[in-house]
Amino acid sequence: MDVNGDVAGRLSVIEPLTGPEGYTPDTLETRTARNLRVCKQVFMVFAVSLCHLSLAAIAMWPNTALSDLRRDNTTMYGNAISLTSTEMDMLGSLVPAGSVPGTCLGAIFVSSIGRRRSIMVLLLPTVVGWGMIAFAVNPAMILFGSGDHLF
């Protein structure tokens, strides 16, 4: 048998790549399980994108917030919030100060529970911080929210 016949003989033995007998994609994963998996993946992509977007928004937020509070200092509830000069300085400095423990906690979480779960865990303080800022009724809530949302 020559080389061409040998190769042709080997190729005729190879079967198409199929699973075991009776295999269909639905037998390994149900439609509900697949939809749940896809929804989890979409949520994780959204959460990671929100983390990056949040970091950019957090970095510039004190500058725009302070100028806006000088012009119109009413909240969603109609309360007037006025910040003293010390509170304005604190608002600008709490954002980087909140990132120090956030970085340490992030490293601990990533090494202990993994990247995916750590993003989900660390997304919660970010949402709580932005919520506190959005629904603030006094300056303390704004200050705590700006320091909290970088954990």
Image (cartoon, grey):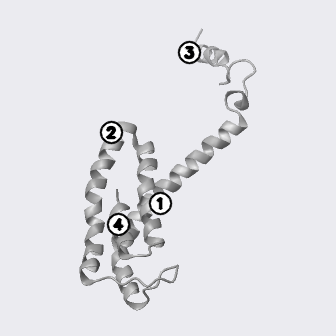
Whole-number angstrom distance, CA of label 2 to CA of label 1: 22 Å
Q: Is residue 32 left or right of residue 85?
A: right
**Residue 147 on image: x %, y %:** 32, 64
> Mark 4 belongs to which amino acid?
Phe
Q: Is residue 38 left or right of residue 98?
A: right
- Residue that mark 1 sits on: 50
Q: Nearer the viewer, mark 2 or mark 4?
A: 4
Screen quadrant of the N terminus = top right
Q: Nearer the viewer, mark 1 or mark 4?
A: 4
Whole-number angstrom distance, CA of label 2 to CA of label 3: 54 Å
Q: Which mark is residue 6?
A: none
Whole-number angstrom distance, CA of label 1 to CA of label 4: 21 Å
- Residue that mark 3 sits on: 3
- Residue that mark 2 sits on: 111
- Residue that mark 4 sits on: 144
Q: Secondary structure at mark 1?
A: helix
Q: Secondary structure at mark 4?
A: helix
Whole-number angstrom distance, CA of label 4 to CA of label 3: 77 Å
Q: Residue at horizontal 25%, vertical 83%?
A: 85
**Residue 105 on image: x %, y %:** 31, 48
> Mark 1 belongs to which amino acid?
Leu
> Mark 3 belongs to which amino acid?
Val
